[in-house]
Image (cartoon, grey):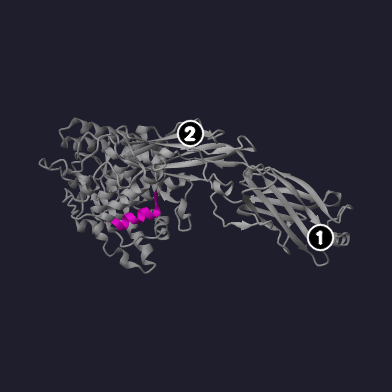
Amino acid sequence: MALLAMSLVLTGCTDDPSDSATASELTGAMSTVGQSLPPDATQAAERLVDLVLDGSADQSVAAAAELLRRSGLPIVTARGPVVAMPDTLVLYDAPVYAELIPALVTATRAHDRYSVDQWATLLTSVGLTNRNLTFAQITKALAGWGKTPAEQPVFTTAAAAVRALSARRGQVLYPAAEVATTYFDPLQTVLLLAHATSRFGIATRPTAKAKALGLTAAFVNAKADDDKGPCEIFTTLFETDDAVTKANSDFLKDQLKDRLAGAVLSEGAKEMFDKATEAWGKAGATLSAIMLMLGARLTLTSDKATTHFKHQAGSRAEHVTLTAKAEFDIKIAADKLECYTLAGLSIPKAGPMEGFTIRWSSEQDQRGTIQKGGNAYLVAVSADSAKMTKGTKTGADGVATLELKPPVENPAGSGEKLKGSATFIAKMDKENFPFELGDIFSLAGGPLGFAIAKSFDLVKDVLTRAGLPEQSITIGVDYHGSDIIVAKGHGRIEMILAAIPDAYVDLVSCSGVNGPFKGTGGFGGSVTEWLRLSRVIGVPIADEYPGGRATLSVMTNPDAPNPFLILKGEGGKQFLDGVLTFYPPASANSAVILDDNRVGRPVGEVEMLVAGNPFPFGDLVWPVVRVAADPRCPAVKYEYDNA
């Protein structure tokens, strides 16, 4: 109700009824969401994150707005009316346009991402730091943020939300986390950038909760002057006087910028924050620009989910057409943003984005290591080959296409039926964007006293680099032939009283790591040696030894160890066994040379076990290798036609 009352007062500052409706509708939705939340700040933040990610469209936008408000960010509208203010502390350099919150939610739910280093570059770009913070420094600062007893609720809420968003992806933000797979989503990016760079004020319309914290009559706002314009009313809703801030300095303890500074100071790098005051104002514009850029959406579709290698050159039935569509999807009932950090910026019309360059790339298995002549499952047709290097521009409908083709099997249909996949990525070129970034940084000032007087080329670069959307799509590809994997090795088993001069395994799969692997395994040696060995290892050897050879067939699971029997000892006791394991698909390993001089690329390992255990006195571990040919597998060539 307090939010609703504030909205009714503040929306009276404009003559446009659509602005009033927008503000009061969002405020009412935020109030409804807020009433269902638990009183604990951490639990409330976690509940809001669930609503942002899982709620209905309207509910998720209201939840995001309420989460931002509880994290200290004011919610405003493009023409000036204030939708909602925080209860106590106000990050007054970082007002959030209500019109941009739907795009923020859409991008967060679509798994858009910013690397931790990109976020560090943002801090450097706006002047908070003079060089990028490291991954370890940032995650160390975040690890304990918002967990101090009697913590300011604004910090607790923002920190809990950042951790909850990571947790929903199965990530934990700490220094030892995997750098390549740990990232910030757009909502985290906005929260963290605002808390790292904004100045704090004290809300002058305190709620009962604010009064309970000691913010009483000294901070009660006098009614706004009638002659204040809609863009200036916001400045009357918080107090920034130094005496006020100092008197309430306890409320500013544990702010994120201090934790970041602490992580750096502990390493003796105080000078990194020497010009931190330069971030004020610029950071707010950067934050708003990031949110505005989220309105540029890219969709990528395919006319086929799967295809097959060609059986006849010249056929186009197996071709795949990818369609990328670029659209601007922020609907603001104004040609320009009239107030706050992006005041004066022209807004593009919602709809298709014409004339923008789409860059294409692909991620595929290294087919060249399997058979000569086919180094990819899918490549661009001859007429579209330049699109992979130079990109292609969208038409009036915002669409750009790429036609792909698979190679031709020769002979067609010979060998195992195999499966592969090709992932294609479409990305808007970093030189393009639906508004002039220079406009953001050439503004002379604004109602909050921002002085953005020079061109921030680094900020402009990082915004385009971090903010442009990309999408990917994976096409399944079937083909006939041989994906040849060899698991082969010979070793000597040395004991104190005996030795096995030749323990071996020789397996091949013609259908990749899924098998089956077929071949032989066993040992050679004299009867005397084996009788001695049997006493040493405690495994009675069957009468037919001095040597043993078994025909093997092994089905495999690429994601787990695959044990298999080679030979049993007398009475069925455990004697020789093997284990096949495979590396992750993306592993890059140097080529190896087999004992028959074939060259291949390792994809895993095969180990021989003696009496069920790894053998410590000999080398019984050998590489599992992908090779180009093996006499036990059909020979099939793959070549691209001229289509």
Secondary structure of the residue carrying tag 2 is: loop
Of mark 2 and mark 1, the one earlier in the sequence is 2
Q: Residue at x 36, y 43 (%)?
A: 391
Residue 336 position by quadrant: top left
Q: Residue at x 39, y 67 (%)?
A: 267
Q: Per the image, is 116 magenta?
A: yes
Q: Which residues are magenta?
A: 114-125
Q: Residue at x 21, y 41 (%)?
A: 346
Secondary structure of the residue carrying tag 1 is: helix
Q: Could you tell whether 372 is left or right of 57 in the image?
A: right
Q: Main secondary structure of the magenta part?
A: helix
Where is mark 1, residue-wise?
Answer: 537
Other-residue count near label 2 (Cα within 10 Å), few / some / many at <14 / 14–19 / ≥20: many
Quadrant into which the N terminus falls: top left
The answer to whether marks 2 and 1 mark residues whose Cβ atoms lie closer than 8 Å is: no
Counting from the top left corner in percent of width and height, residue 398 is at 32, 35
Where is mark 2, residue-wise?
Answer: 319
Circle 1: residue type? Ile
Residue 498 position by quadrant: bottom right
**Can residue 332 be seen at all in this image of the molecule?**
yes
Q: Residue at x 77, y 57 (%)?
A: 503
Q: In the image, is residue 316 above or below residue 635?
A: above
Counting from the top left corner in percent of width and height, residue 463 is at 31, 49
Counting from the top left corner in percent of width and height, residue 461 is at 30, 52
Residue situated furthest bottom in the rendering: 268
Counting from the top left corner in percent of width and height, residue 108 is at 38, 42
Q: Could you tell whether 377 is left or right of 572 in the image?
A: left
Q: In the image, is residue 625 above or below residue 299?
A: below
